[in-house]
Amino acid sequence: MTNINTQETEKRIWKKLFTLLKDDYLLTEKTLANKNFLQQKINNIIKEEEYVFPQNILDKITTNVIYHIQGFGPLQNLINDDTISEIMVNGQDNIFVEKNGVLEKTKLSFSSEEELLNVINKIVSPIGRRIDEGSPMVDARLPDGSRVNAIIPPLSLGGPILTIRKFAKNPFSLDDLLKMNSINEEVRNFLIKSVKEKDNIIISGGTGTGKTSLLNAVAQHIDKSQRIITIEDSAELQLQHPHLISLESRPANIEGKGEITIRELVKNSLRMRPDRIIVGEIRGAETIDMLQAMNTGHQGSITTVHANAPLEALLRLETMVLMGNINLPLPAIRQQIIGAITTIIQLERKSDGTRVVSKISKVISDTTARQEDGYQLEDIFYRN
């Protein structure tokens, strides 16, 4: 009789199952997709090997072995766990998760780098992407929309690295953020008023501060009669709106052809009679097109930007406009920004993992007050 730890048991059953299927010429896509068939084979192995565990543990072992075959191996339970917002795999033996804004290391591991690479390929292959030595870096997404990034040797020196940013099944509302103390009643009411009055809003913050979550929550208050066009690199927004068109950029294929950029989508969206344009994140040459749209009647547009302060957000916009090789002097670019942006909402992630709106600033149409940076900002909310 055998009584060993469950993870080791899963690995042994998994390897024996594949050996049996291979020996019996049953290692086919059809058999591997047949859950009932696999369960029966696993039960037979458990009886033959006389593994001694309570029935609920045996059921869990069976499920996890099937995850290795049909799902994403040791990551599947993490993907299924709604309390986890991010999964980080640093090589085969180091799997971290983020829960409630706090990082923690799990006891999970992959049996080998080969298994980890197989999981990565299982993620990227269905959407026509590949990852190998010739193309060692890839962005993809899971069937539920969760965002995936993978990078492998020779770029990664510590083995294959996989990062999964998960979606909340039920996007946060402003009321949810209020209960979580991410905002207060004053901020909630201000944000609703800003959306109703069609302010052009920039949501600014560092990585993991909750920019997309806040954008989702704010956009829920857009009038149902308005036509919204969302534009993203990788679809993350989950807007519940009756007149919504979602556009997603496309990377080049293996031959280096077929790329559709965010900038091209922003330009095209102007021909689609939008009431609101929402860009998930501006990070390059599309910034000038977004600003021009805001300046030419497309009020109420919303986007996010990586920055640690409202003024820094505006200066980053300048940099991104210049990335587009636009032949405009800096004063003209600043006038475009001042004319376009109404409100900057700054997000911050505290040391305990909580995410909060730390500041809200209005952009004042008067550049003479602060000649050193060309902008005058009025802070209308500040949180210590």
Image (spheres, rainbow, N blue to C red):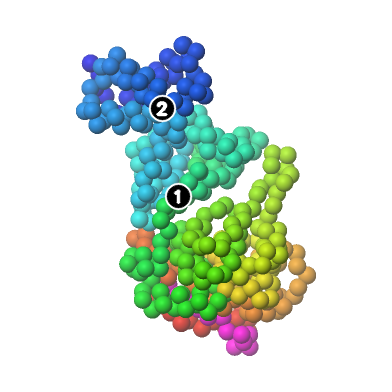
In this picture, residue 229 sits left or right of residue 84 = right
> Residue 310 — which label?
none
What x and y, as percent, mark residue 194? Answer: 50, 77
Specify the quadrant that holds the C terminus: bottom left
Name the residue at 47% across, 27% down: 33
Q: Which residue is mark 1?
A: 166
Q: Is residue 315 visible?
A: no
Q: Nearer the viewer, residue 17 or 11?
A: 17
Can you identify the residue that label 2 sits on?
35
Q: Point out residue 173 in the picture as x, y percentages from the top left corner.
A: 41, 65
Magenta stretch, residue numbers: 358-369
For marks 2 and 1 on the same chain, the one whose residue lies earlier in the sequence: 2
User: For numbered disc 1, what is the local secondary structure?
Assistant: loop
Element marked by disc 2: helix
Q: Residue at x 66, y 35 (%)?
A: 134
Quarter of the view holding residue 327 = bottom right
Frontmost residue, 155 versus 134: 134
Amino acid tagged 2: Lys
